[in-house]
Amino acid sequence: MDPETFRRDLGVWLDANADDLTPPYEDTGSMEESMEHYARVKRALYDAGFGRYGWPESVGGLGGSPLLRAIVGEEINFRDLADPNAWTMIEVLAPTVIEFAPPELAARLVPPFIRGDEMWCQGFSEPDAGSDLASLSCRATKTDGGWLVSGQKIWTSFIEYSQRCVLLTRTGEPDSAHRGITALLVDVDSPGITYSPIETMHGRTDFAEVHFDDVFVPADRLLGQENGGWQVAMDILPYERSTTFWHRGALLHRRLSDLVAQVAASGDHSDIAAKALGQAFQSIVAFRSRSRDTQRQLASGQPLGVETSIDKILITTAEQQLFETARDLLPGVIEFDDGLIAAQWRTDYLYSKAASIYGGTAEVQRNIVARRLLDLGPES
Amino acid sequence: MSEPINADELALLAASFEAIMAESPGPGEADQALIDLGWADLLDASPRQAAAMAFSALGATGSAASLLDDVVVSALGVNVSPQTCVVFPAPHRAEAPARFGDELVVDGLVSARVESATTAVVAFDGEDGRGIAGIDASLLRERAAGGVDPGNAYRRVSLEVAAAAIEPVAAGGSWESAAAAARVALAHQLLGGARWMLAEARQHAIDRVQFGRPVASFQAVRHKLAESLVQIEGATSVSQRCLGDLNPLLAALAKSLAGQAARTTAAHAQQVLAGIGFTAEHRFHYWLKRMLVIDTLFGSAGSLPEEIGHHLLSQGTAPRLIQL
């Protein structure tokens, strides 16, 4: 299907169903409210067909280019119809599970995820394995018919609302680094899994600390090869940095438009305001243009690799610059104002501080660019 | 109109262009050879692809060929010729470089093309709106090129021309579209130059040993070079977007981003090159000075964001511009 036709049809449908799809809550709503609404939007898109394009037929999709999924998320974000972070999970996890799970497992488990009936989460980071992910220690030991998992994960988003978790475990020697990691697809209701929410500085509790205490995982829940989990993790990164970044870029674009409208309405047409807005806009455009190239590359079937670190640095820069600009051009709003509009700017401003930390820190990204793209040799 | 060019032919031509530019790097020196190679036809057939190729080559080789005159002339729908030059806007601006009242008051810049040209094309604003005029190019030759980059031979011109000495020019294209075409071309030149500076700094960082190891092994150095590449790639992507239909706002963004990438890369490359990069012996300073001049033409990374922001404020929204 031609992407522009798809976008037009989708836009018509979204506008016609705006009453059902617009969040019933004000501001960002509570976690429960926003997750419930996310599931409702996802399901409505699935039933209308738009949510099935770009996914293979083997998992309940209608086929077609992954560009179509990028367009769905973009239009949802431009219209602010669903929690943008909840939306990222399927784009990060489903393509990799489809690629690495045995086909019959993917055919059974992925469809409810695509329908919006299920939420999944990602168990990668650990308290002692952040930037140095390959040093993770959550252990999976072979047992009759499967694995026993014990250890700890952190920054696991949405586990409270999730049915499954893509988990990285240590199956090799403790010092086996990336050679001894295995990826498993775990049911979150398995006995032995406990979690406690982490309250963040922007006032949401969408992260959790997770404990695994002899959790049994059946052998058929292996993703990829035993000790081949690093490949699974590396496969996820390009997806995380293509479709979900494109979605987030749309959100940033909408927020910049909001800012322009607010500043224009306030009557501030000063050169200082114009320059700051122009700079924020050009950073977003640079990211969007780069991300478009990446989307096109993915859609044409070419592998994505370390060059997506550039996309990551561009979007992080654009996001932090945008909300710093909002703080400057809406004097005192983030610091003092009450009301929904101020609360949204405040939440976005504070959340933007995480952008240079999650998904590989700003420093790790620059290390990758230096080593792999500029070929500067080893670091001292 | 000649046939549009395909990518393979363009790559071959790029190599020939670079060879000619490298051989004759002085102001306007390569112009005739490039026209003999088909530059004018190429500009006629595939204006944006041709300009992107030629201006990337200008940036990479450090050549001072006067091709910007041809880009503007071609976008205005006037015949490209070594006998035609253009009055460009004053530094950091993009509006018409002249006002027409009782006489034509010109305040702008000219390239080395002014030396060989017989006619100078000047856009002006007057009571009846905007127009394009031709004046005798010899009027503009009175001042020798100076400034920070005499090797580039752009020079400031300000003069009054009597109404009787002005020829009307039948222009098929608007000044706005010519300015947009110039901005995209200059963006490619800035990025070609930025890539050259980054390559020089990278090689130096690998070769230069201090504290018993290459300075490229220090994270502070690596991150400066990484940041340069990131900005270059972001700006390059936007410049590539301008190969299709030319949107004036996107052209302004491309020039601004390229200017910013060049500024960042120049600063980081200078720091990494350290002492040797401060000498006249190392070629870095030629590129630095060229970048200073090219950045100011048709709006700089310092002035363009303001122009772009005023456009957004006047619309009350930010257009999407980039589609999948």
Image (cartoon, coloured by chain):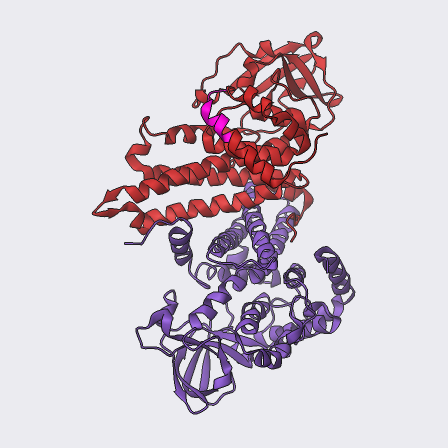
Establish if A227 lies above or below A277. Answer: below
| Residue under the point 31% across and 54% down | A378
Q: Is residue B19 magenta?
A: yes
B237 or A209, nearer to the observer: B237
A325 or A50, nearer to the observer: A50
Residue A176 position by quadrant: bottom left
Report how many numbered discs are placed on residues in the image.
0
| Residue under the point 56% across and 58% down | A302
Q: Residue furthest left?
A: B212
Residues shaded magenta: B18-27
- Could you say where residue A271 lies in the image, as x and y percent from the top left? 57, 38
Residue B181 position by quadrant: top right
Establish if B231 lies above or below B13. Answer: below
Tell me the quadrant of the picture where the C terminus of chain A can be found.
bottom left
Q: Is residue B286 magenta?
A: no
Q: Chain A is shown in which shade?
A: purple
Tell me the quadrant of the picture where the N terminus of chain A can be found.
bottom right
Q: Chain B is shown in which shade?
A: red
Residue B281 position by quadrant: top left
Q: Residue furthest bottom?
A: A144
Q: Is residue A171 left or right of residue B105?
A: left
Q: Main secondary structure of the magenta part?
A: helix
- Could you say where residue A237 lies in the image, as x and y percent from the top left? 49, 64
- Could you say where residue B316 lies in the image, as x and y percent from the top left? 67, 47
